[in-house]
Image (cartoon, rainbow, N blue to C red):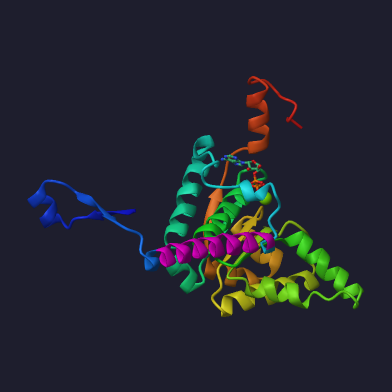
């Protein structure tokens, strides 16, 4: 026997004085098939999420970065940033359509990467969005490697960076941008801008310094497509280390 909860429409709820009732019915071959299909669909969904996670470029540690374990009250900056980022997530459909992203700026250890990755984890699990996480210094290293060694082929990977439905560029602007670096980054940003693909950026560079660092063409496209989120506050790693050392200067203090 199968049981299904049937909720009454409001008029019937008033008439019978209850919200609904259990509908017991024997499981016909047809409903068995339905259950099987549902199970199959759930399995396929899980497999797809796993597959997306494998291709996401996220480290094991980062797969645990979620909203649930982000403490919003460590600083006023973190509170406001978490709100803004959750708002972004809530409006994902429109943001995706318009190619809107986020620019998470602020000092070291303020939670920029954590929040960016929390968005990505959520979108992979909930919406199964093909996403890619890339650290910019590593990206540039790889590109330099391929430039110096034509045997290395990055075409497929670069296609993924340019076309991922959601891309995180972590630590943008953390190194001196030569003209060559500026040009490589422009190609990626410009492509994503033109194709309205959402990009979430984390950076130590204040927005006003971005043009000087990356060139105005790249900076202006970033401003056009990313909402700024400022994370000010102290380094969470140091604060956490101090707290766990009983309030004085713990081993985490450099
Ligand atoms: N508000 C917070 N709540 C919980 N963990 C945090 C918070 N802010 C930072 N962290 C943790 O501190 C570490 C450093 O944060 P991270 O996001 O890498 O900083 P950033 O990218 O700004 O340098 C990470 O392990 C992260 O999970
Ligand atoms: Mg970071």
Q: Main secondary structure of the magenta part?
A: helix
Asked if residue 224 lies left or right of residue 151, the reply is left
Q: Tag count in the figure?
A: 0
Which residue: 49% across, 69% down?
Answer: 96
In magenta, the rendered stretch is 32-54
Asked if residue 66 lies left or right of residue 91, the reply is right
Which residue: 63% across, 77% down?
Answer: 190
Which residue is outermost to the left? 15
**Is residue 45 visible in this depiction of the protein?**
yes
Q: Quadrant of residue 70?
A: top right
Q: Where residue 141 sits: x, y (%)?
A: 82, 64
Q: Where residue 144 sits: x, y (%)?
A: 85, 69
Q: Quadrant of residue 31?
A: bottom left
Which residue: 67% across, 58% down?
Answer: 170
Q: Quadrant of the C terminus?
A: top right
Which residue: 61% across, 60% down?
Answer: 201
**In this orientation, which residue lies closer to the viewer: 86 or 212?**
86
| Residue 66, placed above or below residue 34 | above
């Amino acid at each position: 026997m199968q049981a299904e909860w049937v909720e009454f429409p409001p008029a019937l709820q008033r008439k019978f004085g209850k919200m609904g009732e259990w509908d017991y019915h024997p499981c016909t071959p047809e409903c068995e098939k339905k259950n099987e299909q549902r199970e199959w669909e759930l399995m396929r969904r899980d497999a797809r999420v796993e597959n997306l996670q494998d291709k996401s470029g996220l480290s094991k540690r980062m797969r645990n970065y979620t909203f649930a374990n982000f403490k919003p009250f460590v600083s006023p900056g973190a509170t406001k940033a978490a709100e803004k980022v959750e708002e972004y997530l809530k409006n994902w459909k429109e943001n995706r359509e318009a190619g809107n992203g986020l620019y998470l700026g602020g000092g070291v250890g303020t939670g920029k990467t954590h929040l960016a990755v929390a968005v990505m984890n959520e979108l992979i699990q909930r919406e199964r969005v093909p996403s890619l996480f890339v650290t910019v210094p590593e990206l540039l290293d790889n590109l330099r490697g391929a430039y110096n060694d034509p045997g290395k082929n990055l075409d497929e990977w670069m296609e993924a960076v340019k076309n991922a439905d959601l891309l995180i560029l972590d630590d943008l602007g953390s190194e001196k941008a030569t003209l060559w670096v500026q040009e490589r980054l422009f190609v990626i940003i410009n492509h994503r801008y033109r194709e309205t693909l959402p990009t979430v950026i984390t950076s130590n560079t204040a927005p006003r310094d971005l043009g000087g660092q990356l060139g105005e063409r790249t900076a202006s496209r970033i401003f056009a497509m990313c909402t700024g989120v400022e994370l000010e506050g102290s380094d969470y790693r140091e604060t956490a280390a101090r707290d766990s050392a009983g309030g004085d200067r713990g081993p985490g203090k450099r």
